[in-house]
Amino acid sequence: MTISMKSGNKTQKAERDPYKFLLKVAGILVLVAAISAVVFLLCNAAVQSDYKAKRQEVDQLNAEGEQEFNARLNTLRAAASVTVNPETGEVTAVEPAIWEATLDGLPWRLEDASATALENISTVTVNRSDLLFGGLLLVNPWHSLPTDFSEATLTSIGTGSGWQIAVTDSNVRVFPAALTALENIIAGAKDAGLSDYIVREAYRTNDEQTLLFNSQMEKLSSKYSGDVLIEQTKKSVNYPGTSEYQTGLAFRMALYNKADPAIAKQKFQETTQGQWFTENCWKYGVIFRFPSADYPNANWEDKSYKTGMSLHLDLYRYVGSAHSAAMQIMNYCLEEYVEFLIDHPHLYIYKDGALLYEVYRITAEDASTYDVPVPNPASSYVASLDNMGGIVLAYAYN
């Protein structure tokens, strides 16, 4: 009898090595980080690619939108240049009214676009108080200064220019836009080798104008009386509220040199400085305000029948660059120009074939604020009340 015996096997579990475990965990983390980095790079590349695609799409849409805008503008201009006979349907081309002039050797053109409206506009809210100083406020014997006119922002020409512009005293004041234009004119004259300018007078308060008027009326009281006295006084001094001096946009020029008193005795328009100032001020947004018989010289047309002023005054008025250019092209005084805008409320102004300004007039009743249109291609704009029931906007394209 054979007896077999099986010995019992004991299985011993080896102890876990912590170093190898940490290496395994580290390897897993590195792998996860690598995968995450790859996923991030792939996602980032996808986002960048999508951004570039969207950017190209937007740029393309903008380019197409601009082309569409120009095409619509050209279509509107073309449509405004034809008339259709309602009976026969015959279409006849009509050229828009154009006025041209050569200024400083370059061709300028003013084109009537009144049959078309502004395109691609945004709306801007402006305060009436700001519109009073935009440049085109017409003040003359028939149009008084608005009752809400304020002198709050008037600036001393002397202190405002750092005394680079000579003045009678520090009380010679204008509004900031007029001061800037005057500084630019004086700088232009200096570049031309001209100097010795002085501003003798600018803004007058209503009290000052009243004092001048009453003083002149007293001088004439021995000859006239009643309404005749008032009318005779108006021939030399504007009735209070109707003087150009009260706009804060006008200034009277002369010459002065402390070392040479004889310079101040010269007639401004007979000097090289005065002639240069008168002939070039329009380039800086300023006009010679009161052309009269043979004044400033015989080449100028007498406008006293429009302005109501026949006195020989070396008075200049800020109106803004777009309007001074238009008035120079048309040979208009301020009264004529405002009347022209009522009949031609939309104008294009070209210099050497390039559109430089666009002028647009809208009617407006009295209000504290106004919503005005601004075409998006315009680089800047200036808005002004004209004191004739309208707001005139001048858009620049430079």
Image (cartoon, rainbow, N blue to C red):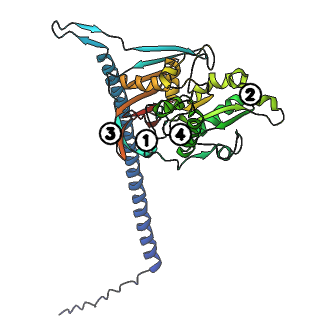
Q: CA distance from mark 4 to mark 2?
A: 29 Å
Disc 3 and disc 4 in contact, CB within 8 angstroms? no
What is the spatial separation of the Cα atoms under label 1 and label 2, in whole angstroms? 38 Å
Mark 4 is on which residue type?
A: Gln
Q: Most extreme residue toward the left, as rendered?
A: 87
Kindly indicate the quadrant of the structure image that contains residue 339.
Answer: top left
Q: Which mark is residue 365?
A: 3
Question: Label 3 to label 1, Cα distance in Å?
Answer: 13 Å
Q: Which mark is residue 367?
A: none
> On screen, 20 above or below 349?
below
- Quarter of image, res 97: top left
Mark 3–mark 4 Cα distance, whole angstroms, equals: 23 Å
Dot 4 or dot 2, earlier in sequence? 2
SS under mark 1: loop
Disc 4 target residue: 246
Q: Which residue is mark 2?
A: 194
Q: Residues within 10 Å of mark 3 (few under 14, many from 20)?
A: few
Query: Is residue 359 visible in this depiction of the protein?
Result: yes
Q: CA–CA distance between discs 2 and 3?
A: 45 Å
Q: Amino acid at mark 3?
A: Glu
The residue under the point 55% across, 15% down is 301
- Local secondary structure at mark 4: helix
Q: Which mark is residue 146?
A: 1
